[in-house]
Amino acid sequence: MMSETHTSLLASELGPVVGTNNAKALEKAFGYTTVEEFLHHFPRRYVEVGELTPIAELPYDEHVTIVARVVNTSQRQMHSRKGFIFEVTVSDELDASGQELRMTFFNGYQARSELQHDTVAMFSGKVSWYQDHLQLSQPEYAILDEAAQADPRPIPIYPASAKMPNKKIRDLMNLLMDQVRETDVPEFIPAALLRLHGYPTRFAAFNDRHRPKQVADGYRARNRFAYEEALLLVLSLAERSAAMGRQLAVARPSIPGGLADQFDERLPFELTEEQLLVGQEISSDLSTPHPMHRLLQGEVGSGKTVVALRAILQVIDSGGQAALLAPTEVLATQHFESIRSMLGPLAEPGLFGEGNGTGVALLTGSAKTAQRKEALLGIASGQTGLIIGTHALLGDQVQFADLGLVVIDEQHRFGVEQRDALRAKANNTVPHTLVMTATPIPRTVAMTVFGDLEISTIRRMPFGRAPITTHLVPMQLPGYQQRLFQRMAEEVSKGHQVYVVCPRITDSQTEPGSLGVTAEGSGNDPMSVEAMFELVNSIPLFNDIRVEALHSQLPTEDKHAIMEEFSSGEVDILISTTVIEVGVDVHNATLMVIIDAENFGISQLHQLRGRVGRGGLPGTCLLTTWLDADHPSVNRLRTVEGSTDGFELAEADLAERKEGNILGVQQSGSRSSLRVLSVMKDQKIIERARKDVGQLTSAAGWRESYPLLAVTLGTWVDEATREFLDKN
Ligand code: ADP
Ligand code: MG
């Protein structure tokens, strides 16, 4: 009886455990409703009195912790149109020298509500130099009442908010931990592994994490939870790989003198060494009776599509069909057109057409009924060797004669379910799969996230690709706005074309006539495509320049027409949202202006600027922002400005997403399967888990030996892997 009530504690609602009002507040702040969710609200770090540094001795550029009393607070608006800075001046509690230190909190709602005159708190952060004094910017802090000042134990610092500050979280967590018993938290990791790595049991780990006796205990508990996630992740991928290895596919070996060979002869350029090498890997994968599961990564324009096309032709040569799945209609249409022109006569089916090639068809959601019927017929009869389309290809009416290869372009838009749905369309056997991504994935991440895929990488661009130069444009400085427009007009006068990308489609608030809002302005919204379009059209400089606006809400036909006009050079400036992010290929475009660039992620910005410099002409990318130079987001833009290495940027992007630790910003509400593990920083733990999983699964019947691990894995895979894979 006891154990029944106890094992259900983690699944139970928070109300009975912490009180109804507190439970409501936790739900509002973080979205938690169960004990288990709140228990996983882990501290970001700990501070302890032992680490204290007196103000007078603060080392520049290092991480410090001080206990200090607030002597003054104030608030100022950012010079940009976003947010405010809350400033706190403190004086040392331990040192009578009267030294003061300033701290700044960007959009510090929580700090503003908690830090008042005379409040004593422990602050911790990195010392920086600003104007003429040392400061801590965005420090983390824990309010110290008298009892806390006397307690020698480390203080956990939680992700917190103004309404749910650190002190309150600590109190509620204590209340909860007092009620959790060992039987509530069953252990599912084999005891031998815990011993091997010196990790605490799951129950002990919750205790150590939330109220460690020493800081080291807290971090060891943290690593236990990271390891737990790594173990489940690696184990799930190993199982998936093993299952795939048992699957059968039809071998599609290359046929000498077939379409693939004829295509190689037609190519107007030499394939690069990497393209040839990857081509061989794929070709030999396709020749075996087991399905290929390969990820092909390479920057935009690195020549992936050509490689994929050679694989497609090999499959068609040996009697199969191929499907190419693109994330948007614009992209599918572009692929269709460029592939048909690359194939030339090889895209003429032999039976009814002129040539000795194969049928190539396009199927998208907006296809007309007659078109659609024809496409479906060609696919079902096998006359169409290659079908290109969007998710419309996944529909029930689409029946293949013999689907042999699925190529998925720009994988980050699709989830595993979609991959599986398309693969399920092969009769009886599993088709070969090639996933192409232009977002480079760091090796460790690839190993973990795509552990079930083989990976091929194209690192070098084909010869003749011009470099892209990127500049940050600080709009609040005098003259920059005008200079930006002049630069755009100059580019057009040289006969080139310009992309302008805005973060949003419409904007009811922005007044036309001004690019964003001036320093005194109160607006907060990023620039919209529509407002930008109006603005550009209202400026005499652009009188003879043809400008169009493109975004996802336009009717499909308009979208195609505008894209067509831009491709053919009838339109000089294209103002759009990120619809042009992937795959769009206009060689004459040399300038990319990204407005209010702080609204985009690092990888996204890199992807966007890959749209220019594609035709041998050097490309320029301008990132505009109204943010002050000291705004945290400007760092991100500088990272993009300073590097064109897609792999380096992908790592920066990922590191940032995991470390988004501005106090008050909570990301912990999501149920993401990887709550603790950082695929970037926990490489050692991941390696450890890989080794352990290797041993575990090499012995027969681990599921029987460790039934609780098997059950936990099952639940975890159902809920979590999918969610994680989808998001990344
Ligand atoms: P990705 O799919 O990786 O974005 P594509 O395959 O579309 O890249 O190639 C981008 C452009 O470079 C296309 O115009 C393509 O014809 C061209 N290209 C591909 N491989 C080579 C090569 N080896 N030499 C010269 N140009 C190439
Ligand atoms: Mg491409």
Image (spheres, rainbow, N blue to C red):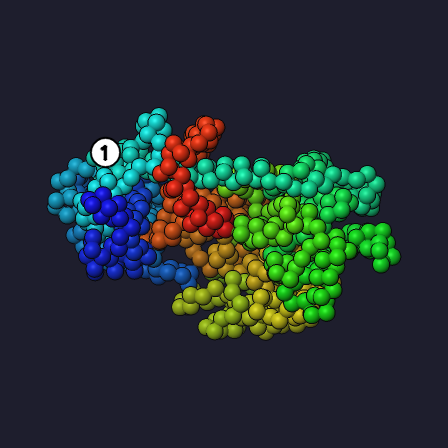
Q: What kind of residue is marked 1?
A: Gln
Picture quadrant of residue 194? top left
Task: Say whether residue 42 is visible.
Answer: yes
Q: Position of residue 604 (x, y in %)?
A: 54, 52
124 shown above or below 15? above
Where's residue 557, x and y in %?
67, 70
Q: Nearer the viewer, residue 189 or 508?
A: 189
The residue drawn where x is 38% and y is 53% is 670
User: Quick check: 376 above or below 726?
Assistant: below
- At 41% from the left edge and 53% from the top edge, which residue is drawn? 631
**Which of 335 and 36 lies nearest the eye of the viewer?**
36
| Residue to which mark 1 is pinned | 214
Q: Secondary structure at mark 1?
A: loop
Residue at image position (16%, 52%) is 118
- Estimate the x, y position of residue 183 in percent, counting from the top left: 24, 40
Q: Is residue 52 visible?
A: no
